[in-house]
Amino acid sequence: MPTIKQVAALAGVSVGTVSHVVNGSVPVSPDLRLKVEEAIRHLDYHPNHVARSLKTSRTRTLGIIVPDMTISFFPQIIRGAETGARAKGYSVIAVNSAESPERQGELLSLLRSQQVEGILLINAAAPTPPGQISRVMDAGIPVVCLDRVPEGFPVDSVSVEDIDAAELGTDHLLAQGYRDIAIVTGPLSLQNERRRLEGYQRSLERAGVAFSPDRVWQGNLRSEALAAMCRERLSNPATRPHALLCTNGPTALGALRGMNDCGLRTPEDIGFVTFDELTLDDLFTPAITTLVQPAYDIGFRAAEILLERIDQPERDRDAVYTVRLPAMLRVRDSSKKLIRRDGRPAEVVPMRIKR
């Protein structure tokens, strides 16, 4: 097995320079880095990080726990976190909790046993047992929560501006002439889902449109159940809303399936806006209007904060970082202006500008 000394000899540099290139601990000139990297490839050298961690008590590894890797929003967060970590010479271990608080607890223990130096956490949808996060932090391992932020607990967090984003989507539908708008949510046990509901309500109130609890369609994050719920509520033309606002990708896919089952088209029969880009968006006709969350940036910024916590362990734990990033409305065909039955565009009530 090649050694670091052999790499240094082949590259014509010191062992310390090879170490700096491998660990990213000290900047190295581009010419020297290129020589070291070529020697590493030629010798097929693999540094022994286990031995190094035993010597230095540093693994230069972060963990990230996501609820469901099949939802495209979460892998984008992982990519951002990996980029942020790699820039500082860290690697990332990604694991999946399957939306289970119990599994999440097991994974937190697993990552601790792997000697990760910090953990990025997207909470499971079901309520997390008290103390699950604080035990990790009490053990000296910093935690940053992403997207789904726990309440009543001081922890660093990065997420989207949920209220503003939901207002933006609802404002857009109202400006297109829609007034009877239903919101399809995930579990309202999640703070971000409740905040998106709050944004929807604020937008309606500002436009002078009455809020109806019957237009809050709370679901889970399972496509089949969401499709069944939407199919039932869309089947009666007399009670069908004019538009839907979905608060995440899974609810959007379930709602679209329910609409299809009812023979409904968008925007001809119902306007449609959703949070999160759908991975197969190019296959949807017409294209879907989307509130795009900066998933990659959320992951990248969270990794930066976590690494800062690792580098500054003396920083007051109660002085938390709270980062909220804006969403962007990407307007496409699914939210075109509401058309009246006589074929003319519906009257659009002017929107008041938010101050």
Image: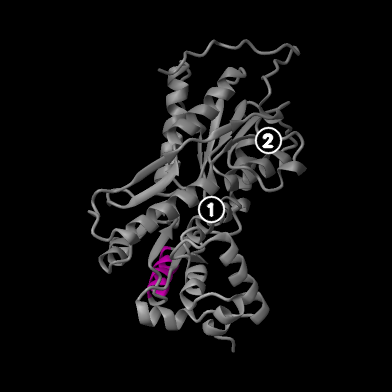
* Tag shown at residue 36: none
Judge whether residue 129 can be spotted in this image. Answer: no
Three-letter residue code for mark 2: Ile
Residue tagged by mark 2?
288
Left or right of residue 225, residue 207 in this image: left
Judge whether residue 193 can be spotted in this image. Answer: yes
- Residues under labels 1 and 2: Cα distance? 24 Å
Tell me which segment is drawn in magenta. Answer: 101-112
Three-letter residue code for mark 1: Gly
Q: Secondary structure at mark 2?
A: loop
Q: Nearer the viewer, residue 223 or 108?
A: 108
The residue drawn where x is 54% and y is 74% is: 13
Is 321 above or below relative to 10?
Answer: above
Residue tagged by mark 1?
80
Where does the N terminus fall, quadrant-wise?
bottom right
Instruction: Determine which quarter of the picture holds residue 197.
Output: top left
